[in-house]
Amino acid sequence: MILTFDIEEWFHLLDFDATRSELQWDSYEIRIYDNVERLLRILDETNSRATFFIIGWVAQRYPDLVRKIAERYQIGTHTMNHQLVWQQSREDFRNDVVSSIHLLEDITGKPVECFRAPGFSIRESELWALDILYENGIRYDSSIFPAKGSHGGIPGGLSNLQREGYILLDFRKLQQSPELLQQHPEHIIEFPISSHKICGKDLVFNGGGYFRLMPYPLIQRWSKESAYLLSYIHPRDLDASQPMLPGLPLSRRFKSYVGLKSAESKLRKYLSDFQFTDIRTAVEAILNDQKPNHQE
């Protein structure tokens, strides 16, 4: 069971013009310190591990916060400026990712091997992004949304992808056959968002707004039934006192603000009921299980 955090500020919304680009972000209140501290406390108190996908814009302004996270947890990139992949040219995407990787590595002194696209915006038409990621040292990706989402998604997930020519290995297949990594070492391992099938369709239930809105007994039951489980949380998902952005349409208000008051206690219970780890440890655990035991 894998836990991930997308380290963004509370105003990093992708479908709202007033907060779409970095030109507007400096005018908003800083809440990232308190929100990340909350996440770190929860991890400590529940003995959990997680992978942190950090926006380069955040790292550039608050490198001390990034160093604090990196002392104990795995760091990945969430791009430099939190823009949708399908709104960028290939060269713009490459420059954005490379600059974020270099920045995070300079701050932490550690290699950056994980990536998540803002809004899970690698669609089937943007699989070229995987090649760019691999060329720049990314070995673990978590950008595939297994349903139609607000900013992308691939309904049916990896099972529906035409993967020929792309360096992509599904972690769920690696769980079943760890030797695949030895057979195909030059692959990105994909960690898709986990989901539950309802009437033949995939429903995401344990990440972001879905986690806030879904009743906990349902999250708990579906999690127990899942052979593969990956959860993602934004710091703002637990920030019940964050301001209301003016001018938000009703649909966006609902997605961003409903369920905030109960989200922290729900996450604490979730991490107490299930043992979560980070992406790197999940891969290492599978590979270590395959090593032969040597007798003295």
Image (tube, rainbow, N blue to C red):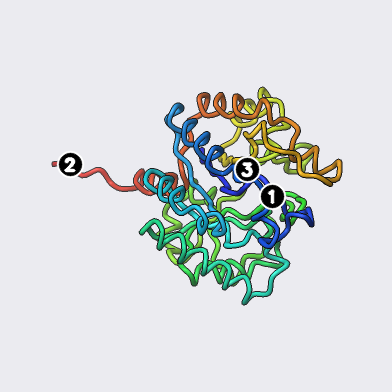
Q: Residue at x 84, y 47 (%)?
A: 247
Q: Give SS at disc 3.
A: loop
Q: Residues within 10 Å of mark 1 (few under 14, many from 20)?
A: many
Q: Is residue 158 visible?
A: no
For residue 94, side relative to residue 155 (left or right): left
Task: Specify which label sits upstream in the sequence, 3 or 2.
Answer: 3
Q: How far apart are the two marked residues, 2 and 1, measured between alpha carbons?
A: 44 Å
The x and y percentages for residue 263 are 64, 29
The answer to whether residue 170 is above or below residue 244 is below
The answer to whether residue 104 is above or below residue 51 is below
The residue identified by callout 3 is: 194
The residue identified by callout 1 is: 146
Task: Specify which label sits upstream in the sequence, 1 or 3.
Answer: 1
Q: Residue pushed farthest left?
A: 296
- Residue 121, which numbered label? none
| Amino acid type of the residue that numbered disc 2 sits on in the rendered structure | Gln
The x and y percentages for residue 150 are 77, 51
Q: Nearer the viewer, mark 3 or mark 2?
A: 3
The residue identified by callout 2 is: 295
| Amino acid type of the residue that numbered disc 1 sits on in the rendered structure | Pro
Q: Is residue 109 visible?
A: yes
Q: Residue pushed farthest right?
A: 250
Q: Give SS at disc 2.
A: loop
For residue 186, side relative to residue 94 (left or right): left
The x and y percentages for residue 183 are 43, 62
Q: Across the whole image, how many numbered discs are drawn on residues? A: 3
Q: Nearer the viewer, mark 2 or mark 1?
A: 1
The x and y percentages for residue 208 are 66, 40
